[in-house]
């Protein structure tokens, strides 16, 4: 049976949920009908536009830009602060409602999920009819709207839901790719980050169709395994399995929420260095090496993205982990501010296991030589004895501070670490 997958995405979730809550409490104006944004003042960590109304979009206001810029474009703009506790509750209620149709739901962020409609398709005249019942039920029950994309795999369903908004249903079946998806700008392809788009445009690849019809080997020459994935996505190749229950991750990882959003690679790199140092120590303490490294991003608006790569050979060295994470970050980063970064390792092997060299389609950092391995072990022993951070490499020290500075920019940005360790 051909899978039928829905991607369900709340239209401008933060603004819609705020508007619904205000109307419930007696507000006279619907934020969705006027130039409005969800954001924060310049002194807060939410000093960027998190969500915008259609009227604000007509002024050229973009999600992720500084609030000050938005007010320059539209002086009479109405701004409301985010309420993430309320958003989580709205999200919980939405997912509960969707599970009354089927339990095959994979939530991928606070405001979007995949639904495997295959098992309940026989109840409806068509997938579009089923989607209409779900969409209209959400609007009537909760007061906000969603877009629903329909296809045979998750990738195409996701692309379809991003077509015309709000309150719409779109299909993107494999036979519709050439007409509906290929004419779109390359930047609209799922997982095509800013740096990848820049590379593709230099190759005169400007639309998704250009990429789909390009030589896959040429794309891989410039973008390695990420290029292969983008080429497959441009041709509609993607997974269709909806993970209704999260798989238990067998690995060791750390993530950290930043006190201030990071928007440059100079701010991101030291964070990955510290995360990699911690993960490396834990791998060595467990007597393990990692064959796979995953990198996680949470953007300023709480959207998440992750990317992973196989290492050339298993490693527990922080340099390898950090460089791999930075490489993965650059491949998918959209250029928008990020509030959380994470590194996770998997495919663990025993540290003493014999190594078999393999050739992979992505060039990853090489293992340190024996001299540097001994140095790293000595550093680990000192940090184990005197506490984490007691001894660090000079390359990880913050830049020299000017008088009056309290802490380096990278120290200032990094907040509490949410450590995830599973073996």
Image (cartoon, rainbow, N blue to C red):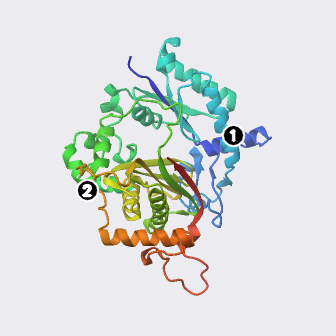
Q: Position of residue 353 (x, y in %)?
A: 33, 51
Name the image quarter holding residue 368: bottom left
Which residue is drawn at the image coordinates 41% and 22% (left, top)?
A: 3
Measured Cα–Cα span from mark 2 to mark 1: 45 Å
Could one spot residue 20 in this view of the protein?
yes
Which residue is drawn at the image coordinates 60% and 27% (left, top)?
A: 98
What label does residue 89 carry, if any?
1
Could one spot residue 60 in this view of the protein?
no
Q: Position of residue 16 (x, y in %)?
A: 64, 41
Q: Is residue 120 left or right of residue 377?
A: right
How many labels sit on residues?
2
Q: Position of residue 405 (x, y in %)?
A: 59, 81
**280 and 118: which one is in front?**
280
Which residue is drawn at the image coordinates 69% and 42% (left, top)?
A: 19
**259 and 133: which one is in front?**
259
In which quadrant of the rendered image does the N terminus lie? top left
Q: Is residue 230 left or right of residue 381?
A: left
Where is 50 relative to 166, above or below?
A: below
Helix or strand or loop: what does disc 2 sit on? helix
Name the image quarter holding residue 91: top right
Q: Position of residue 234 (x, y in %)?
A: 31, 39
**383 and 226: which one is in front?**
383
Between marks 2 and 1 in the image, the one whose residue lies nearer the viewer: 1
Which residue is drawn at the image coordinates 49% and 55% (left, top)?
A: 342
Q: Residues within 10 Å of mark 2 (few under 14, many from 20)?
A: few
Q: Which residue is mark 2?
A: 202
Where is 392 relative to 339, above or below?
A: below
């Amino acid at each position: 049976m051909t899978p039928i997958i829905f991607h369900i995405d709340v239209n401008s979730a933060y603004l819609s949920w705020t508007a619904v809550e205000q109307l419930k409490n007696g507000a006279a104006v619907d934020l969705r009908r006027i130039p409005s944004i969800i954001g924060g003042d310049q002194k807060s960590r939410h000093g960027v536009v998190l969500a915008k109304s259609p009227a604000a979009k007509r002024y050229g206001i973009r999600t992720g830009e500084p609030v000050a810029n938005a007010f320059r474009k539209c002086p009479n703009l109405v701004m409301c602060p985010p309420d993430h506790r309320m958003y989580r509750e709205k999200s919980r209620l939405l997912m509960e409602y969707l599970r009354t149709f089927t339990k095959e739901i994979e939530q991928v962020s606070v405001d979007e999920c995949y639904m495997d409609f295959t098992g309940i398709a026989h109840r409806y005249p068509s997938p579009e009819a089923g989607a209409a019942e779900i969409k209209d039920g959400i609007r009537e029950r909760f007061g906000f709207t969603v877009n629903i994309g329909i296809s045979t795999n998750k990738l195409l369903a996701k692309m379809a839901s991003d077509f015309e908004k709000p309150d719409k249903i779109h299909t993107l079946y494999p036979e519709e790719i050439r007409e509906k998806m290929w004419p779109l700008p390359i930047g609209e392809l799922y997982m095509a980050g800013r740096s990848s788009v820049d590379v593709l445009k230099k190759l005169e690849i400007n639309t998704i169709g250009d990429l789909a019809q390009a030589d896959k080997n040429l794309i891989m020459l410039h973008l390695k395994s990420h290029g292969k994935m983008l080429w497959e996505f441009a041709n509609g190749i993607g997974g269709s399995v909806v993970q209704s229950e999260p798989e238990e991750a067998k690995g060791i990882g750390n993530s950290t929420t930043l006190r201030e959003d990071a928007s440059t690679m100079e701010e991101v790199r030291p964070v990955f260095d510290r995360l990699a140092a911690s993960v490396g120590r834990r791998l060595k303490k467990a007597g393990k090496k990692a064959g796979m490294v995953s990198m996680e991003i949470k953007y300023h608006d709480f959207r998440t993205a992750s990317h992973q790569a196989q290492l050339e050979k298993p490693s527990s060295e922080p340099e390898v982990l950090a460089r791999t994470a930075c490489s993965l970050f650059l491949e998918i980063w959209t250029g928008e501010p990020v509030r959380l970064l994470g590194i996770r390792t998997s495919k663990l092997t025993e540290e003493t296991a014999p190594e078999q060299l393999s050739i992979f389609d992505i060039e990853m950092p090489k293992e340190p030589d024996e001299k540097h391995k001994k140095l790293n072990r000595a550093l680990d022993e000192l940090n184990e004895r005197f506490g984490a951070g007691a001894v660090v490499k000079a390359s990880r020290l913050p830049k020299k501070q000017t008088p009056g500075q309290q802490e380096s920019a990278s120290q200032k940005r990094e907040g509490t670490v949410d450590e995830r360790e599973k073996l």
